Amino acid sequence: MTATVRTVADLMTSPAVTAGPAETLEVAARRMAEAGVGSVVVAEANRPVGILTERDLMGVAQLRPVEGAFTDVPRGLKGVIVAETEIGEVRGLEGFYHYRQYSAVDVCTHYGFEDAWALLVDGHLPDADEAATFRAELAPLRRLPEPVAEVLPAIARAGLAAPGGAGSLDALRTAVSLLALAEGFRPSLDVSPERLRADGLRLGAAVPTLVAALHRLAHGMAPLEPREDLGHVANYLYMLHGAEPEPMALRAVEAYMTSTIEHGFNASTFTARVVTSTGADLGSAVVAALGSLSGPLHGGAPSRALDTLDAIGTPERTEAWVRDAIARGERIMGFGHPVYKTYDPRSAMLRDIAREMGGPLVDFAQQVEATILSTLAELKPDQELHTNVEYYAGVVMELAGLDRTLFTPTFAAARVVGWSAHILEQARDNRIIRPSARYVGPPPPQPLPR
Ligand SMILES: CC(C)(COP(=O)(O)OP(=O)(O)OC[C@H]1O[C@@H](n2cnc3c(N)ncnc32)[C@H](O)[C@@H]1OP(=O)(O)O)[C@@H](O)C(=O)NCCC(=O)NCCS
């Protein structure tokens, strides 16, 4: 038998993929990626003058081989699609967002918190029987395991020194981490989708219990055991205040929490997906997401919007106050959004609920809102700055009797549901999220100082 001798001609790419010496590295890299080759012949006036390899590019750009071209993206990844999702979407120009295929505002108006939860996690709006089964599945999960309940007073005491206080998101983050540890959550890479779903329900059901317990402990009150006969939001308000909520307060907080369950690829949701993409457990992803949510530019603003109303004091002072704040380079809390460039539909829904609740705070907030909007339009004519969810969320929660320190933890108690849905989706079709950065420091390698 004769051995087959393979020649260069058998393997070479023909015609040769070439690049010009004056072309940018990005263009050459893209051509390599499109042709599926690891090098190009550098040609000038149809004469080969050199070879550029993927390794050369990696040396310069500190990039690992990737399938696509090396692409610069806008700061903050604005407008960049980084994943596919069936969970929902925010259409910023239309002022519309949806949970799966349904308008989120319609879901908030016609369904309860647990129904929206089932929709996101299980994929469809439950019928009456399914809704009852889902609620019955969740209710016992509100109870905390003994080792966690025992440590909560210590977390609350430690939190007294924290800027946000003992009932803050930092305290919640610590407690959630402890709960995930006590529950023995395993890496998402190693568990079944059913197990991961169960972990998500466990955290989602227990977070309000943690928030309420930390809040009560921070105010010298004993935590209350959750009640299984109440709905998720009604039980949360009961655990906070020790009494069943008034129907209007319940409707307002339930609408707020349902409208906040999920909102596209915001920073905390993206964080949860990045952590999950490493195969880490659901608890780690939620703890990281809580950290992301704690920033004032994301979840930390609803109480600040009310603080703004306090600082303004009377409607006549609004315009001068806004002008001063903008002159100092500050942002007006409760206005502007990275995606909505028109009204925020959540804000419109909550404004309607606030109007239904009525009272001097609502009248004041509406007057101030109108002046802030017109002043911002004058001072920042190139920006589309509209009222965001947090402005009326603050008003509605204040009227429902929630302490200001609870605003962000309440937001978190709702959003943990959306994070869980995203964690499940990420784990189902996972790929580690690992982008690149352009190195812009002094050219390496420099000699060591000694
Ligand atoms: C939410 C937020 C971070 C989104 O920002 P963004 O769309 O990415 O916009 P940028 O940060 O790029 O800012 C763009 C411009 O609009 C201005 N701007 C954005 N929000 C503003 C606000 N609330 N008040 C005053 N100016 C604002 C910025 O100062 C900047 O102006 P400049 O170009 O003259 O410097 C921003 O609107 C903000 O800080 N809002 C206040 C905090 C808040 O309410 N957060 C809750 C969000 S739901």
Image (cartoon, grey):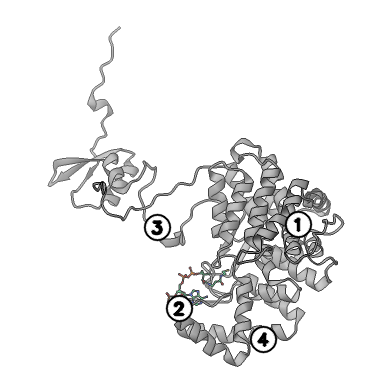
Residues at marks 2 and 4, CA–CA distance in whole angstroms: 25 Å
Picture quadrant of residue 186? top right
Residue labelled with disc 1? 209
Picture quadrant of residue 220? bottom right
Q: In the rendered structure, which disc, 2 or 4, sits on the residue that comes first in sequence?
A: 2
Q: Is 151 displayed left or right of 332 in the figure?
A: right
Do callouts 4 and 1 mark residues in contact (Cβ within 8 Å)?
A: no
Element class at badge 2: loop
Element class at badge 1: helix
Name the residue rendered at 62%, 90% in the picture. Answer: 315
Element class at badge 3: loop
- Disc 2 residue: CB within 8 Å of ligand 1: yes
- Disc 1 residue: CB within 8 Å of ligand 1: no
Do callouts 3 and 4 mark residues in contact (Cβ within 8 Å)?
A: no
Q: Is residue 322 above or below residue 63?
A: below
Where's the N terminus, which quadrant? Answer: top left
Residue labelled with disc 2? 329
Which is nearer the eye, 141 or 425? 141
The three-letter amino acid code for the residue at tag 3 is Val
Residues at marks 4 and 1, CA–CA distance in whole angstroms: 33 Å
Which is nearer the eye, 120 or 171? 171
Residues at marks 3 and 4, CA–CA distance in whole angstroms: 42 Å
The three-letter amino acid code for the residue at tag 1 is Thr
Which is nearer the eye, 397 or 442? 442
Question: What mark, if any, has residue 73 been given in the picture?
Answer: 3
Q: In the rendered structure, which disc, 2 or 3, sits on the residue that comes first in sequence?
A: 3
How would you rate the neighbour count of disc 1 (Cα within 10 Å): few for under 14, some for 14-19, many for 20 or more? many
The three-letter amino acid code for the residue at tag 4 is Phe
Question: What mark, if any, has residue 364 been given in the picture?
Answer: 4
Residue 449 in percent (x, y) is at 26, 49
Question: What mark, if any, has residue 395 been given in the picture?
Answer: none
